[in-house]
């Protein structure tokens, strides 16, 4: 099961990572001073990402 994992970094800021069912971290957040801000960011991603566009800025390979 995919999951968001909230943790505190060495600087004392709250961060989260999104983990795949195999335990691999797929992406991580920036640091937040307040835990509520990190949780709010997670909720925003969950709410707004289903229709997210994929933009490929790499050059097309021939």
Image (spheres, grey):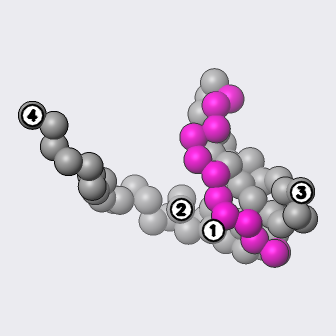
Secondary structure category for the residue under label 1: helix
- What residue is shown with label 2? 45
Dot in front, 4 or 3: 4
- Which residues are the magenta region? 23-34
User: What element does badge 2 sit on?
Assistant: helix
For disc 3, the marked residue is: 10
Closest to the observer, 13 or 23: 13
Q: Which residue is mark 1?
A: 41
Does 10 appear in magenta? no
Write the residue at 64% across / 31% down: 24
Answer with mark 1 or mark 3, whichever residue precedes in sequence: 3
Q: CA distance from mark 2 to mark 4?
A: 34 Å
Residue 37 relative to residue 22: left or right = right
Q: Which mark is residue 62?
A: 4
Q: Is residue 40 left or right of residue 53?
A: right
- The CA distance from mark 1 to mark 3 is 20 Å
Q: Are marks 1 and 2 in contact (CB under 8 Å)?
A: yes
Can see residue 13? yes
- C-alpha span from label 1 to label 2: 6 Å
Residue 7 location (% of width, % of height): 82, 53
- The numbered mark, 1 or 4, whose residue comes first in the sequence reads 1
């Amino acid at each position: 099961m995919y999951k968001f994992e909230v943790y505190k970094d060495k600087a004392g800021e709250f961060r989260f990572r999104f983990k795949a069912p195999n335990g691999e971290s797929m992406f991580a957040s920036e640091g937040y001073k307040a835990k509520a801000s990190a949780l709010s960011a997670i909720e925003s991603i969950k709410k707004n990402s289903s229709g997210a566009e994929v933009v490929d800025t790499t050059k097309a390979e021939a």
